[in-house]
């Protein structure tokens, strides 16, 4: 199967490419950034998801059998800074892609990656199912809900073979440093090296997240391309909420460092608990379930952070 990946140069794309190649798929990438690190079987198209002409050119030239749409702005606070840009990339970009495939008249399996953020943060009496109403609580979630709904509606209207994935917070090696887990891991690694002040800057440690390893997520995407049902949405999650305080405690154990905590107003979210996802549908249709433990993921992220510390950098003491 030849798979087109939009946004392939990002965190998830860099894990999805080798996952697909390892299972015999051909990979074509589309990204505004230069081609991801070299993979022998990968063909790259440079282009912006907001450019319908560039998208149609990439689709017409590569003739994919399937597509995973990853291209998006994913840092939630950025939505409040420039909401128009986030709508252009996340919502209009997804519509551009779907329209490009509609005009190509090719029977392509399309996986549009949405987010569990579309469900909002209100407490739930049970795990959230795909048919529960969306209740986005931030601009990022609104843009993802728009792309999500458009994918399912256009799939039904035009007979596209489109599906939607709604993953929870995925973490793992290679994630950008502004996100909570790599930020903590870097700070712990600096303190473990012995040069940094033993104080961790953090937001609300009692905030909750549903974390799943990115390597489990890309396996889910591969299985959905093979076995998912067009017109359906699929939750992808760990099945449990983890407090940020637990991440702190586990990284402290991995690093052997027990720092104090300094509140960072820029990171503080007063009420921020994410509902647990019901993953029964993806289990039933594909057999997928998460395999990597939170401890393993945090260990891998910490080891990556420790390996990337510049020995010449002087830290505040």
Image (cartoon, rainbow, N blue to C red):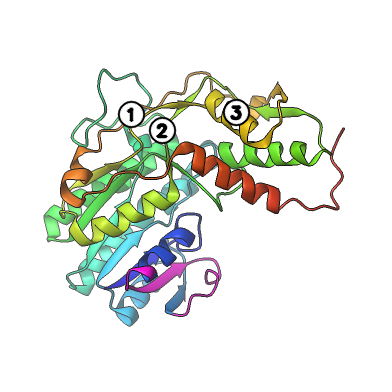
> In the rendered image, which quarter contains the C terminus?
top right
Judge whether residue 25 is colored magenta. Answer: yes
Which mark is drawn over residue 248?
Answer: 3
Please state if 276 lies on the left or on the right of 307 as rendered.
Answer: left
Q: Secondary structure at mark 1?
A: loop
Within the magenta stretch, is there residue 50? no
Pointer 3 or 2: first along the chain: 2
Place of residue 99 in the rendered image (x, y in percent of width and height, measured from the top left):
26, 63
Q: Which residues are magenta?
A: 22-40
Task: Give the image location of residue 170, x and y in percent.
Answer: 44, 43
Can you identify the residue that label 2 sits on? 210
Residues 16 and 68: in front is 16
Residue, disc 1: 276
Assess disc 3: are there few (<14), some (14-19) or many (≥20) residues with their C-alpha within 10 Å of its C-alpha: many
Under circle 3, the secondary element is helix
Could you tell me which residue is drawn at 48 percent across and 19 percent down?
271
| Inter-mark Cα distance, 3 to 2 | 15 Å
């Amino acid at each position: 199967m030849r798979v087109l990946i939009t946004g392939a140069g990002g965190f998830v794309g860099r894990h999805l490419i080798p996952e697909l190649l390892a299972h015999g798929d051909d990979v074509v990438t589309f990204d505004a950034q230069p081609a991801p690190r070299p993979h022998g079987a990968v063909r790259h198209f440079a282009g912006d998801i907001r450019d319908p002409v560039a998208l149609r050119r990439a689709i017409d030239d590569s003739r994919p059998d399937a597509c995973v749409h990853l291209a998006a702005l994913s840092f939630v606070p950025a939505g409040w800074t420039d909401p128009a840009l986030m709508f252009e990339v996340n919502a209009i970009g997804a519509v551009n892609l779907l329209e490009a495939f509609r005009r190509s008249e090719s029977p392509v399996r399309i996986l549009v990656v949405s987010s569990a953020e579309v469900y909002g943060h209100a407490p739930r009496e049970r795990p959230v199912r795909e048919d529960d109403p969306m209740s986005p609580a931030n601009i990022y979630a609104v843009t993802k809900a728009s792309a999500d709904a458009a994918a399912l509606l256009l799939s039904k209207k035009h007979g596209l073979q489109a599906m939607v994935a709604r993953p929870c917070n995925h973490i793992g090696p290679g994630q950008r440093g502004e996100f909570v887990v790599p930020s903590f891991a870097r700070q712990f690694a600096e303190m473990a090296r012995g040069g940094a002040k033993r104080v961790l800057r953090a937001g609300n440690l009692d905030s909750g997240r549903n974390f799943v390893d990115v390597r489990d997520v890309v396996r889910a995407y591969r299985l959905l391309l093979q076995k998912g049902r067009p017109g359906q949405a699929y939750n992808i999650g760990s099945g449990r909420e983890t407090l940020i305080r637990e991440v702190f405690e586990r990284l402290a154990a991995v690093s052997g460092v027990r720092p104090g905590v300094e509140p960072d107003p820029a990171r503080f979210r007063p009420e921020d608990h994410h509902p647990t996802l019901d993953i029964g549908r993806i289990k039933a249709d594909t057999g997928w379930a998460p395999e990597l433990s939170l401890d393993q993921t945090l260990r891998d992220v910490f080891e990556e952070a420790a390996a990337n510390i510049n020995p010449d950098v002087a830290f505040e003491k």
